[in-house]
Image (cartoon, rainbow, N blue to C red):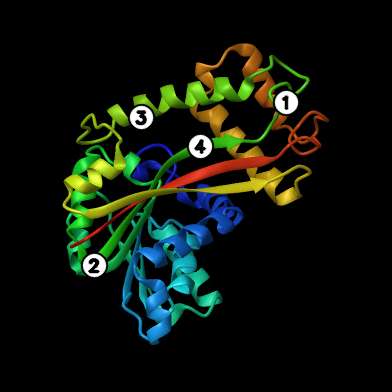
Amino acid sequence: MTGGHPMELDWEELAPMLEREAELATPLYEQAADWLRTLLGGSEERAEGEASVRRVWDVGAGPGVVTCLLARAFPHAEVVAVDPAPELLARARDRAARLGLADRFRTHRAELPGDALEELGTADLIWTSKVLHHVGDQRAAVALLADRLRPGGVLAVAEGGLPDRVLPRDIGIGRPGLQARLDAAQEEWFARMRTELPGYRKTVEDWPALLTAAGLADTASRSFLLDLPAPLDGTVRDHITARLTRAAEQYGDLLDATDRDTLTRLTDPTDEASIAHRPDTFLLTARTVHAGCAE
């Protein structure tokens, strides 16, 4: 999910960017899925020819890119894409059908917090990525998800990591260090956004501690790298341009006039200094996944 309260966003407009972001990060998510298989006894499973993972939820699934990846990673499981936006769930169903996964793929409209998840019963693996930071009471949301696990099941929370890096420190226009100032502006905007969420409660974002407090054991964290070096193809450039355009819309008012002008040039495809033309543009980022097991 992207910034703002999820029901206030234009999902038809945002969906292509969400899909492209997840598709570009597929290698990263595949590594995370491999790790989760080990936590769920994947090697023993394959050796015995049996599958203990029968139900997987992707909570905050968006357009279903990662949901479909999880369906492939756990080929014996029914996979459920959970999201409050019907437009995104429709895209998720279409993607599953295109990939031949429709027979094991379900969608369910629900939002955290809320009791709509209870209708789904329980799961062996619950995955949620960049969703809980949009929930006012993160501790309660973790507890709610942990309560839906079957014995031996795993809750995986993808939150944090490293912010995207796409440009060198000095890009030849504006002031050097633009990305550091973008990070600072985003943190200020994000802190303000959180305080405006319904039911907001200040929470120390120690995710392993939150998983433990929810009754889960054997907590662990792993970070996974996405490294797309320069020169980039057009798809990645388009994605970076879209992200910087959205950054300017969300928290451009927290930047000075020079940085706003630099962002305008970087996102203007007719400008030779833009992301569309720069030979030094890259994409480097890391996502951290925190997991805990139900006893």
Residue that extends furthest to the bottom in the rendered view of this protein? 49
**How many discs appear?**
4
Mark 4 or mark 1, which is nearer to you? 4
Q: Earlier in the sequence, mark 3 or mark 4?
A: 4
Numbered disc 2: secondary structure: strand
Q: Residue sitting at 29 percent across and 44 percent down?
A: 208
Mark 2 or mark 1, which is nearer to you? 2
282 left or right, relative to 85? right
Q: Nearer the viewer, residue 120 or 280?
A: 280
Q: Earlier in the sequence, mark 2 or mark 1?
A: 2
For the residue carrying disc 3, how many other residues have a C-alpha within 10 Å: few (<14), some (14-19), or many (20+)? some
Identify the amino acid type marked 2.
Gly
Vertical order, 101 against 56 (above or below): below
Name the residue tied to disc 1.
265
Q: Is residue 68 visible?
A: yes
- Disc marking residue 162: 4
Q: Is residue 76 visible?
A: no
Alpha carbon separation for disc pair 2 and 4: 30 Å
- Tell whether label 1 touches label 3 (CB within 8 Å): no
Alpha carbon separation for disc pair 2 and 1: 52 Å
For the residue carrying disc 4, how many other residues have a C-alpha within 10 Å: few (<14), some (14-19), or many (20+)? some
- Indicate the quadrant containing the C terminus: top left, top right, bottom left or bottom right: bottom left
234 left or right, relative to 148? right
Q: Residue sitting at 66 percent across and 38 percent down?
A: 241
Alpha carbon separation for disc pair 4 and 1: 25 Å
Name the residue tied to disc 2.
152
Q: Earlier in the sequence, mark 3 or mark 2?
A: 2
